[in-house]
Amino acid sequence: MIRRLSLLIASTLCCAPVLAAPPQLKAKLLDQPQIMFKPGDGCDGNDLADMPARVFRDAQGNLAMFALHFNNRLLRGSSFDSLKIDCK
């Protein structure tokens, strides 16, 4: 019984995958922060940017950004500088 257990432990240890060290990630800001949305830019009084922005590129290659409160409207544009709220 002890011999079987020893053999099981030894085979598990020698065949277990080796865990690599986690990758060292670094982030660096390349530019100054920019204001993407001001409350006066909204469609109504409920358009408040109160959450982290989420951005993706659509099928046409344009940016679409979400970051608003009650009515989560898209901000659309070809670049970050051209994002405008879509009030539809």
Image (tube, rainbow, N blue to C red):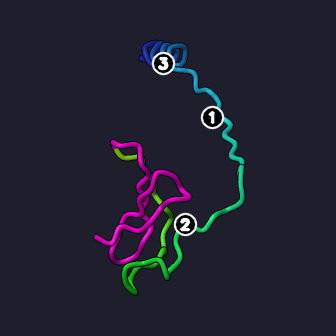
Residue 78: percent from the left, percent from the top? 46, 51
**Dot 3, crowdedness within 10 Å: few (<14), some or many (≥20)?**
few
> Between marks 2 and 3, how big is the CA–CA gap?
54 Å
Q: Which residue is mark 2?
A: 36
Q: Amino acid at mark 3?
A: Thr
Q: Earlier in the sequence, mark 3 or mark 1?
A: 3
The C terminus, quarter of image: bottom left
Q: Quadrant of residue 43?
A: bottom left
Question: Which stretch appears magenta?
Answer: 59-88
Q: Amino acid at mark 1?
A: Pro
Q: Secondary structure at mark 3?
A: helix
Q: Which residue is mark 3?
A: 12
> Between marks 3 and 1, how big is the CA–CA gap?
23 Å
Residue drawn at (66%, 40%), measured in percent from left and top? 25
Q: Nearer the viewer, residue 24 or 64?
A: 64
Query: Looking at the picture, does residue 77 appear above or below residue 50?
Result: above
Query: Looking at the picture, does residue 15 appear above or below residue 41?
Result: above
In the image, which is nearer the foreground, mark 2 or mark 3? 2
Q: Amino acid at mark 2?
A: Met
Q: Which residue is mark 1?
A: 22
